[in-house]
Image (cartoon, grey):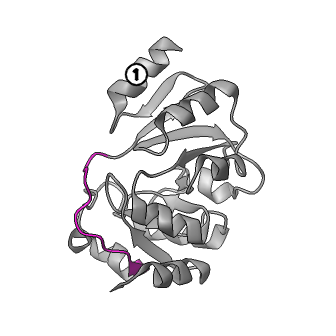
Amino acid sequence: METTDLAAAAAAVANGDLVVYPTETVYGLGADALDADAVGRVFDAKRRDRDDPVSMAVPTLEAALEYTRPTAPERAFMHEFLPGPVTVVLERTAAVPDVLTAGRDRVGVRVPDCEPALDLLAETGPLTATSANVSGRESARLVADLDPEVREAAAVALDTGETPGGTPSTVVDVAAGQVHRRGAAVADVDDWLDAH
């Protein structure tokens, strides 16, 4: 794995390779979220169970609408919390591969509040949005802290220094009124769900 710039990271994604990229929470492990083979390599690198879905990151709310069918309440939630450290679970379109969602009809979508991540996503389109670590191990806020297995699997890392926050994103299913993972901004998410 080499530390690189935006253009090289985008080229690696286009080549089907894995990249490590920063978010406002922790470093993510990215691959083209619409390429089933690339997504499979993310599962392999993380030693993640194929029944455990991976979310996808997109650069804008408008981009999210190309791959999902949000309801009016889900759209309202997205406008309130994205970009930000929140992943919202939405009905997916056929463009989203089964491997990403473990065959489910819903996908987690995230718009990071992190300029380097958004710049990369603007170049690449949807990327897998999962922490750059072996499943069950500590998430990394520094490229230097990446698991050796992730270093080996990723072609490049977009290293911007330490990420601002170490808490993973909060994962929310607005339709069910459920928080699947309590993380960053969870108190605000709870308040929004209570009020709606």
Q: Position of residue 17 (x, y in %)?
A: 53, 80
Number of callouts in the render? Answer: 1
Image: magenta residue range:
153-167
Residue under label 1, please give it: 190
Depth check, front residue: 63 or 130: 63
Which x, y percent locates residue 168?
34, 46
174 to the left or right of 65: left
Magenta span main SS = loop
Q: Is residue 78 above or below residue 22?
A: above
**Label 1: few (<14), some (14–19) or many (≥20) C-alpha neighbours in 10 Å:** some
Question: Where the N terminus falls, by quadrant?
Answer: bottom left
Q: Viewer-proximal residue, 7 or 39?
A: 7
Residue at the image point whose x is 58% and y is 71% from the top: 123
Residue found 41% across the figure and 66% down from its top: 116
Q: Position of residue 95 (x, y in %)?
A: 75, 57
- In-front residue for pair 180/120: 120
Residue 190 spot, x, y in % from top left: 40, 22
Q: Is residue 46 magenta?
A: no
Residue type at the position of mark 1: Asp
| Displayed quadrant of residue 185 | top left
Looking at the image, is 98 positioned above or below residue 173? below
- Residue shown at 28%/45% (left/top)? 167
SS at mark 1 in the image: helix
Residue at image point 42% right, 27% down: 189
Question: Which residue lies most toward the top here?
Answer: 195
Task: Assign the C terminus to one quadrant of the image.
Answer: top right
Where is 89 relative to 40, above or below? above
Could one spot residue 102 in this view of the protein? no
> Can residue 154 be found in the magenta stretch?
yes
Residue occupying the far right of the picture: 94
Q: Is residue 23 visible?
A: yes
